[in-house]
Amino acid sequence: MKLDFIDNVNEFDESVVRLYDFDKSQAIQLRDLIIQTVILKKQRLDFSNVDFIEPRNCNLIFGLFKTDEGILSSDKQTFYCALTPDGYTNMLKLIEPFCLKDTKGYQYLYDIDNPIDFLFSPAGTW
């Protein structure tokens, strides 16, 4: 599984943090890690410390927040995903189809009015 940041993907000056190049087993690993670390233990999940994720040009840190803000960054290198427990629970529902079978599809992992989208795409495309 690879993690990267793509700046200015469209004419609206929007950007994407992308998790890609993975199979069903890695989707399951990520789902379980989110459940264990963020949902149950209420701890931050730093992707740079996850052995099956290869950060390419950025890092992503999941953390709990009082409101769903989505992905934020001040330097376009370190990104923070700030969601409520319900926001992460919804994200898990969006990841679940990728845990059931290998697919070439893709999914945005939240629907928040935010200039940085979060793309989950085995093939890396959208």
Image (cartoon, grey):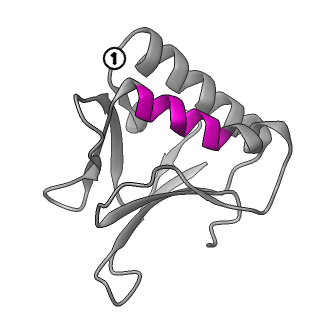
Residue 9 pos. (x, y %): 41, 81
Residue 10 is left or right of residue 113, and the answer is: right
- Which residue is rendered at x = 55% and y = 53% of the image? 2
In the image, residue 41 above or below residue 67? above
Residue 91 belongs to magenta span: yes
SS at mark 1? loop
Front in this rendered view, residue 27 or 53: 27
Residue at the limit of the structure toward the top, as seen here: 41
* Range covered by the magenta-colored residues: 86-95
**Residue ID for mark 1:** 43
**Which quadrant: the C terminus?**
bottom right
- Which residue is rendered at x = 74% and y = 62% of the image? 105
In the image, residue 13 above or below residue 109? below
In the image, residue 126 above or below residue 119? below
Say what amino acid the circle numbered 1 marks. Answer: Gln
Residue 121 is left or right of residue 4, and the answer is: right
Residue 8 pos. (x, y %): 33, 81
Helix, strand or loop: magenta stretch: helix
Q: Quadrant of residue 83?
A: top left
Residue 12 pos. (x, y %): 31, 84
Q: Quadrant of residue 96?
A: top right
- Which residue is rendered at x = 34% and y = 90% of the image? 11
Residue 78 belongs to magenta span: no
Residue at the limit of the structure toward the right, as seen here: 101
